[in-house]
Image: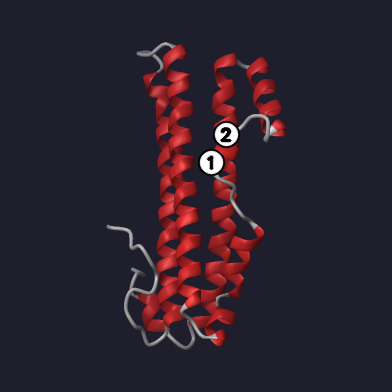
Amino acid sequence: MPKSKQYLQEPSADPVAAIVKALDKDVERGEDILMLGLGVVILSSTFAPLMPPTVLLPSVALVFAVSSGCARKNYHDMERKLAEAMAQLERRDKLRLRPIAAVFAEHQMPPLVDSYNILKNVRRTWKSVLGGILINPFWMPIFYVMGIQIGEEKNLGILNRAVYTVEQRLAPSLPEIFEEGQG
């Protein structure tokens, strides 16, 4: 399924419904990315008899880093596409999308460069070091990127609730649009 570059590609009877539907798909895509990363990490224990910890544990950290990086890119893409779409809407339609836009305004995600900077994330770094001391030093990078992954999941959950709220407000007037994907 190819990702669209913008939410309003063609004229619609209700552009807000089209935007919300596309946003819902993008939120699901972000959740799928994070769950795929988590699933691969959980399955990594099956490779423990075959791989030494010096190879397996950094690989687990790398999987977390890739999945959280892809989810962050998806989050920033949603924010950009929503801003572009809202620029084309009338004031009334912008007000209907306000709960979603508020999530992006209140829960801004910094660039990944800032997330991986240990000096800008002292608390996460301290927790990772403490976990590494208690368990195994090779777990420090896993704990660090797991903290990034948890932050991504939290923001997607908040965004998902906002999208659901707007869907519920739109559903009485346009039930057929939101029932297409149900089944």
- Mark identifier at residue 46: none
Q: Hey, what amino acid is under mark 1?
A: Leu
- Residue at (55%, 48%) from the top-left corner? 153
Could you tell me which secondary element the residue under label 2 belongs to?
Answer: loop
Which quarter of the rendering shows the N terminus?
A: bottom left
Q: CA distance from mark 2 to mark 1?
A: 6 Å
- Mark identifier at residue 116: 2
- Residue at (61%, 32%) from the top-left corner? 117
Q: Is residue 157 above or below residue 100?
A: above
Badge 2 density bin: few <14, some 14–19, many ≥20, Cα 10 Å: some
* Residue tagged 1: 112
Q: Position of residue 19 (x, y in %)?
A: 43, 73
Q: Hey, what amino acid is under mark 2?
A: Tyr
The number of numbered discs placed on residues in the rendered structure image is: 2
Q: Position of residue 110 (x, y in %)?
A: 59, 47
Q: Is residue 137 left or right of residue 127?
A: left
Name which quarter of the figure residue 24 lies in. bottom left
Q: Is residue 156 left or right of residue 35?
A: right
- Residue at (59%, 28%) from the top-left corner? 143
Q: Position of residue 34 (x, y in %)?
A: 46, 44
Nearest to the observer: residue 47 or residue 83: 83
Could you tell me which secondary element the residue under label 1 belongs to?
Answer: helix
Badge 1 density bin: few <14, some 14–19, many ≥20, Cα 10 Å: some
The answer to whether the residues at label 2 and label 1 have Cβ atoms under 8 Å apart is yes
Q: Position of residue 77 (x, y in %)?
A: 45, 57
Name which quarter of the figure residue 125 lies in. top right
